[in-house]
Amino acid sequence: MNHSPQNGTFSSKLGFVLAAVGSAVGMGNIWMFPYRTGQYGGAAFLIPYCLFVVLFGIIGLSGEFAFGRLTGTGPIGSYDHALRSRGKKGGAILGAIPLFGSLGIAIGYSVIVGWVLRTLVGAASGSLMQTEPETFFAQMTGAFGSIPWHLAVILITILVLIGGISSGIEKVNKIMMPTFFVLFVVIAVRVAFLPGALDGYQYLLVPRWEYLANVDTWIMAMGQAFFSLSVTGSGMIIYGSYLSKKENILHSAGMTALLDTCAAMIAGFAIIPAVFAFGLDPQSGPPLMFHTLPRVFQQMPAGRLFAVLFFLSVLFAGITSLANMFEVCAEAAQRHLKLKRQYAVLLVGAAAFAVGLFIEQEASLSRWMDIITIYVVPIGAVLGATMIFWVLGLKAIKPELQLGRQKPIGKVFDFFAKYIYVPVAALVVILGIVKGGIG
């Protein structure tokens, strides 16, 4: 197979890391992490969460980056390469599972980001500030209720990808991700001066150590870390395939995990104290973003301005995540359907929009995302972990991980990769099914 990427490479390590962070930072950081932190022990929750972030970041992310850089392609070609190294066939079929996981997530995610865009425009025009949040949300989440906004998000993502790797994905992430962090810091600073915000900080930060004895705390921390870092057996493989051979993968993986965690913490400091300041419920999921927070902005001084800043930053997080999901599928269409890049990107966008049209209703979208996130994506991630560390094996992947490094990777990495990371990834699948979702 061709071991060089067909779309060029990232022009800098910073660009690569910001693109990877852009893929990882998404709705889970914003509407799930703050709530779960408070729900499962405040600062005590951060202990298992950070442990899992280290495991999934240093082992999982670095493994996927290295797998992609080694093969120069996405999951179909990479999995095929791994099985052929053992004299086996069928890798392309297995590689299609995480690829369809990325497409499935992209279909649902584009609808949600369309809601974000509609809410951003409502904040800017003032209509969001004058309407009951539940009413505003219901108006855009009925059957075929968000078509223009949904389409606009897909078209924006297509434009990003048609620009290519360095001039499209990298350039956009260099703008959007720093802006995301700056906007959330501005919001967090403003929120800190709201009367009653202290209760929110206590909810987030006061450790309730007894929760560490609760198995669910560890399960939810594991699920949160796993899904937050986008260790899906596809998206980070494709970005790894565009990484220069001179870059230190372990360092890049560590920086991605660190910045993703920072994004989650900043989101927590921006959202939860504001919710407590106005005596509202810090629930998770869409109700937090589309019901609770608009009510906060309606009541706080200069709320319209901060609503615009908030939903703009969320839009940036959504677009950068979608770009990664679309890229996995577009690269596969280029390589395996022999399409030119622009036609491959348009095909993926059209497919995502065509299917997404029929799940714009909130209940339909919820069912779709449950199927994809509970079954397809975690199974794809386990397949990826198994392919990298057991089928291809450490003997083949470690030289790729060693490129760009002076200090040799120790044997402890081998143990954690094969005997800790892969079984824990399998556990994510099992527990997700048992509990009806943990991410």
Image (cartoon, helix red, strand yellow):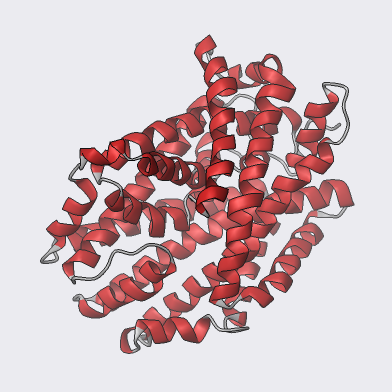
Rendered residue at 55%/60% (across/down): 319
Rendered residue at 22%/38% (across/down): 209
Rendered residue at 17%/45% (across/down): 206
- Residue 148, percent across and down? 61, 81
- Judged from this view, the residue extending furthest toward the front is 434
- Judged from this view, the residue extending furthest toward the left is 195
- Residue 344, percent across and down? 79, 58
Q: Quadrant of residue 82?
A: top right
Viewer-nearest residue: 367 or 145: 367
Compared across the picture, whether 246 is left or right of 346 comes to: left
Q: Quadrant of residue 268?
A: bottom left
- Residue 321, percent across and down? 55, 54
Compared across the picture, whether 242 is left or right of 202 comes to: right
Q: Is residue 33 above or below residue 248?
A: below
Viewer-nearest residue: 424 or 144: 424
Compared across the picture, whether 381 is left or right of 96 comes to: left
Q: Where's the N terminus, which quadrant?
A: top right
- Residue 137, percent across and down? 44, 81
Compared across the picture, whether 88 is left or right of 413 comes to: right
Total marks drawn? 0
Rendered residue at 21%/79% (across/down): 299
Viewer-nearest residue: 12 or 90: 90
Res. 62 visible in picture:
no
Q: Is residue 1 above or below residue 171?
A: above
Q: Quadrant of residue 361?
A: bottom right
Res. 107 visible in picture:
yes
